[in-house]
Amino acid sequence: MEPHLIISIGRQIGAGGLGVARRLSQEFGIKAYDKELLAEVASESGLDETCFAQRDEHSSRGFRTALQNFRSLLGLYNRAGTNTVMTEEQLFKIQSEVMRKIAAKEDCIIVGRCADYILRDEPRLATFFIAADLESRVRNLMRVGGKTEEEARRFIEQGDRARAAYYNYYTFKRWGDSASYDLCIDATKLGDDEERVVDLIKYYLQQRHLI
């Protein structure tokens, strides 16, 4: 049986990477995993999904905790209420195992979470990083997230720093560095148009005979 198509999308906050993933999902009829992955992880491990949400890469507070001490023990609770102590590394391992199981059973798109590194041995893996200029990202967060300009800038600064620290720590590569991905795309150069970004990704996949 032919290996499954795996698309990994890393992205700067506010650059539209999640929207691109959703468009690709609709275009190809395959599932895009973002927050849904947390539910998979929670089900796999027997832990409450909220435990993982607190460590999710979108949570600045969770990342500040991780940055202070990646190896600190975290008191987490399972659904039965029993205290279960796990390290950040153990949580990462569980999430990695879930990703590998998903990749083994279906074509999929995975947003963030070091998927490009975790699934690096998949023969039909294609990895992308979506970036945009700061002003575009600020405007996107103000428009979609209802943030003030100051809030948007602060959110971007903290979130990008947290994502970079998470990615760099677990992959031994550099988040956003072109050497870490098959293709890096500046969405601003394409008019911040998700459809044009999707078209570029599709063209790349065609050239590699992945679709």
Image (tube, rainbow, N blue to C red):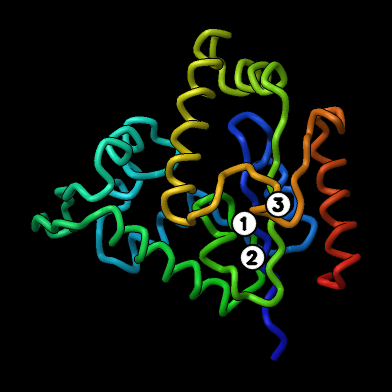
User: Quadrant location of the C terminus?
Assistant: bottom right
Please give the name of the residue rendered at 14% of the width and 48% of the height, measured from the top-left corner.
75
User: Quadrant location of the N terminus?
Assistant: bottom right
50 or 93, which lies in front?
Answer: 93
Question: Comparing marks 2 and 3, which lies closer to the viewer?
Answer: 3
Give the residue number, with chain letter if any, for mark 1. Answer: 32
Question: Comparing marks 3 and 1, which lies closer to the viewer?
Answer: 3
Q: Are marks 1 and 2 in contact (CB under 8 Å)?
A: yes
Q: In this rendering, would 155 be left or right of 69?
A: right
Q: Earlier in the sequence, mark 2 or mark 3?
A: 2
Give the residue number, with chain letter if any, for mark 3. Answer: 128
Marks 3/1: CA–CA distance: 14 Å
Q: Amino acid at mark 2?
A: Cys
Position in image of residue 3 (x %, y %): 68, 82
Q: How many marks?
A: 3
Describe the element under mark 3 as helix, strand or loop.
strand
Marks 1/2: CA–CA distance: 6 Å
Q: Quadrant of residue 190?
A: top right
